[in-house]
Amino acid sequence: MDPERDGRIDKLNDTLYSRTRYKDHLDKRTPVREFESPNVEDKWQTPEIDEMLKHDLIPPRVRPFMKKIFIAALIFFFATVLIAGFVFTGGGNFVSSKNVDVSVLGQTKTLAGEVLDLGVSISNTNNADLEFANLSIQYPSGSRNPDNTAEPLTYSKEDLGVVKKGTETVRSIRLVLLGSTGEVKEIKFSVEYKVKGSNATFYKDKIYEITIGETPVTLTIDNPDSVTSGETFTTVVSVALNSREVLKNVVLKAEYPYGYSVLDATPGSVSGGNIWALGDLSPGSKKTVSIRGQLVGQDKEERTFRFYAGVSDSNSASPNPKVIIVSLLDTLAISRSSVDLSVAFNGENVDTYIAPPARPVSTTISFQNNLPDKLLNPRLEVSLSGLALDKSSVSAGDNGTYDSLNSKIVWNLVNSGRFAELNPGEGGQVSFSFSSLPGPSLALGANDITLNFVLTGTPVEATGQSSLTVSETRKVKISSQVSLSSKVLYSLGPYTNKGPMPPRVGEETTYTVIFNVGNTQDDMTDAKVTARLGPGVAWLGAPNTGTENIVYDSLSSTLTWNLGALSSGSGFSSATRELAFQVSLKPSIGQVGTAPILVSNIVFSGQDTVMGNVVTINNPSLNTRLSGDPAFIQGDDVVIK
């Protein structure tokens, strides 16, 4: 280490940390030295650079052999580009879909229902054969086989075999197109093929458009210009064929407006009251459908009917038009009825009322004069008919006169002043009741009662002329009468019961429960009986049920007896349906002094196959009071300790 340098450092330390050598700061200032700019040349070039620029650059030396290789590569590149462009843009490739052409010869507009002939040409301008070629056709909706117009055409595929290079293959296509006027149909032709030495499959498609001209079916509707609300009128719809070919499976469909109800139709509809299968139409033939119904609405309202004529794909029981050929609208105006006539059965204003056998049906007839003038001598008459009617049950109210011989009730109507007239806007109501014969007395199929209501009177302005008449028809259908009985036994029945009688707290007593179901008329479907076991009651089963279907749900303590079909006459002309099952009761201390419920919520339900309504019957709960057991003694039903 340098001794001189170490001495300077030690001296500096002594000066820095010494207390005795401290000196006051001296305010010495040194002026800033004036900046001297360097001498910069105006030009950056030096003499050396100028000397270098004066000499010419020596070009690199190119060898003749490398130059020839470069020129040859350039020529080859441009030649390749030209050849590729010619092949792929000019179609000069050996196999290209552009060299396969599909053309269709035929008319571009056809009449619906007429046979359409088309020629399809497949040409191959490739330099190779097309192998395994086939022609597939996708037909539009409404296409039919010309040999059987009931058969739809959707897709076809034909083997073309080998299409030689430079040749053409022609095929003939025949079909019938159905549709509405002006509708455009598209037929898709596809050629599928392979080439030798390749597993790839190539395609060529062609879309051919055809416009539907005039329809072969003419649809006409004959309706009144206006109808009175609630009055019956007839609509006549005619379907005629104008084409030269037979049209098969013709279907007529109607869409009715709100407030319209169909009473009957000729011929009858095949589905929903609005679809008719007209069958096959021959050239020049015509078929007619007559629909009788009622339209209810406000004065001056308009309602529109819409009818469709088309064809279906099959002769099914409920065909729907798969292809609509023609449709037509018809609008009716509603005018106010001269006299309003309204009928209610047990408070229900319906065209068809369903009632149980031998139960009174309370009927109310309301009427009102809507004419601007008085209606003189108003008279209301009701005629009842039907084998199900119990003539002795008819009872007329409001001063009506009942003719039991003719089953007719007559009222000579009067106003509030007891005059035989109805002022404009004035009305009133009368009532009567009737019932059907008991279920066992009803003949098979005799379950209808028909009521015809006729109100007559003479308007003041038409005195001496024909009277005004307003009529209504209603039906009452008698539904199946199902009987449901239930009882609890101890000493009788298919099961042996045990346990104390009367029942004792904490001890088990078993019981037999028996259900019986009968039916007077009309077969029923989906018939079943449901019931629920009471508190403290356990299900022991039903081993002697035979073919009966029993289901017990332990979570809800619910029993379901599925009867299925319940035939007419069960329990009368044939054996009753019966179910017996066994339960046990283990009473609790809280049931002392009571007769516990064993089975509750006993309900029968089933659908009447003729009426279409659901019949429901409820039975009271069953407890330990065994009134149907001959060995039962009063007091054996009460729980003891």
Image: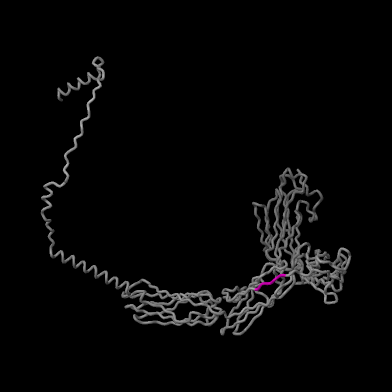
Towards the viewer: 403 or 518: 403
Magenta highlight: main SS? strand
Towards the viewer: 12 or 287: 12
Towards the viewer: 199 or 37: 37
Horizontal and vertical percent position of residue 189: 44, 76
Q: Is residue 149 left or right of residue 299?
A: left
| Vertical position of residue 84 compared to residue 603: above or below | below
Horizontal and vertical percent position of residue 48: 11, 47
Q: Give the number of marks.
A: 0
336 part of magenta stretch: no
View extreme (top): residue: 20
Magenta residues, as a range? 330-334
| Vertical position of residue 57 compared to residue 91: above or below | above
Query: Quadrant location of residue 119?
Result: bottom left
Towards the viewer: 291 or 590: 291
332 part of magenta stretch: yes
Horizontal and vertical percent position of residue 446: 77, 72
Q: Is residue 44 visible?
A: yes
Query: Quadrant location of residue 292?
Result: bottom right
Q: Quadrant of the C terminus?
A: top right
Q: Is residue 362 left or right of residue 188?
A: right
In percent of the image, x 32 and y 71: which residue is there?
88
Horizontal and vertical percent position of residue 224: 70, 75
Q: Is residue 466 left or right of residue 144?
A: right
Q: Can residue 567 be seen in this view?
A: no
Q: In which quarter of the image is the N terminus?
A: top left
Q: How does the figure colour the protein chain or chains? A: one colour
Query: Quadrant location of residue 36?
Result: top left
